[in-house]
Image: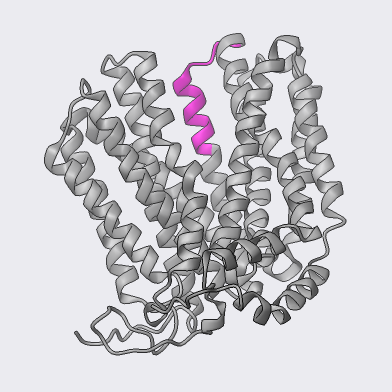
Amino acid sequence: MTQSKLPSLATSRPLRLFAFTSFYIAQGLPIGLITVAMPAWLAASGASAGEVASFVAITTLPWGFKLFAGPMMDRFRFPALGGRRPWVMLAQSGLLVALLVLTLIGGTSAEVAFLTWSCFVINSFAAVQDVAVDGMAIDILPEDERGRANALMAFGQVAGYAGAGALCGWLLVRYGVSVTAGAMAAGVAAILVLVTLLRERDGEKLLPWTAGSVQHEEHLHATSWKAIGVNLTRVLILPMSLLLMLVTVCWRLSDGIFITAIPVVLTQEFGWSSNDYSTWYANSSFVAALCGVLLGPLIDRHGARKFFILGFLACFVSYLVLAMMADGWDQPRVWIIGMFAVNFSIQIVFVAFIALHMSICWPRVAATQFAIYMAWSNLCRSFGAKAYGEMSAFLEAGQETLIMAGLSLTGAVLLVFVRLDRHRERLERLHVREPAEDALADVPARF
């Protein structure tokens, strides 16, 4: 096979920004099919509320389990093909095969159990791809580029699931499961071709049988499960790591309350239809993601921590204004403007959150470490939703937004104490201790 003429991700900024945006679009495709389009189609086709709830609960489980993929990627590497690229290719291939199987077998709205487990498998590969792409981004992206890259990646995911959700919703009604899965398979195949043609670094292999060699530092490869566990514990308990995990609690608790409380308030108390809410929420999310792209270069220039604080303060102001306008919540324009303001503020927080957490990861266990931060984020969001369910009966109009405002302000205050320079010094000291860590490995693993 002839060698690719394309530059590597490490040497071309435009190429890596385009590639990571594309990888996140690919990640959004199954989300659009499984999380946006399929539940609505099942419900409209006569599936019971319990069946739809089970479909959603089971098919989203892989996103909670993705932290288990991190240790596999840190433990088993194929460095001649790139640090994380082989895992991205493997996950993309599995995702493509799973969609092709669904294309061939099809399924009807009456076969809820079959569709549930088919989509569970699809999401399993999508979750593995997410971990692999995040690990690759940590390895490849320069620190002064992570803001714009994460803004583009966040936009790619939103564009992927918004576009796929709309397309799949239309295809399911008119052509059924086979054609819909085939359309998604075509999109995934296009991204698989892209990742197959791109190297992480110049001189690496494109495929196992092509020319190339190891180009990155092999000492970054953890050599045993025990080594991964020891290194991971060392870096997770560093002060800045623990502080940022506490900041995550503030953000995701408020986020969990928002996504649970607002649709309940608007549909049950003010008569919004579920379609009206979904449409406005999707539109505001898309516009926020588009605006977030413009903020990326500013985040690189001025630092993720500053924009993290700015995003929290914007959330605080948005929630506080909504609380003060509780008497006008029956006017749709109040919440339409409110959703745009909140989603824009959350987008700033999200992009800065990803960039800052990438900065504190230690390359030896980066995939696992970052996956744990993301799993912690998802757990806090779920807890926020659950907490609102427990306290909603005791809240009056506007109090839920006051709680969210308080959490946002607390997060901004905590971020004042984050010092990345001190964290890097501690990582350097851990790096010096590597020989002691290497002694933990019984058998070196070379791939």
Instruction: Measuring from the top left, give residue 295's x and y in whole percent.
Output: 64, 59
Q: Position of residue 192 (x, y in %)?
A: 29, 64
Between 25 and 214, which is closer to the camera in this rendering?
214
Identified at 30% across, 40% down, the residue is 167
User: Residue at the front extreme?
Assistant: 442
Quadrant assignment for the N terminus: bottom left
Residue 340 in view: no
Q: Looking at the rendering, which quadrant does residue 262 occupy? A: top right
Q: Is residue 436 shown left or right of residue 106? A: right
222 magenta-colored:
no
Say which of 319 and 373 sits in front. 373
Residue 93 can be seen, yes or no: yes
Provide residue 66's location: percent of width, then percent of height.
Answer: 48, 49
**In the picture provided, is 401 more to the left or to the right than 117?**
right
- Across and down, in percent, residue 86 comes to 36, 70
- Main SS type for the magenta part? helix
Q: Which residues are magenta?
A: 270-283
* Residue drawn where x is 34% and y is 32% of the image: 37
Q: Quadrant of residue 436?
A: bottom right
Instruction: Classify the position of the C terminus by image quarter.
Output: bottom left
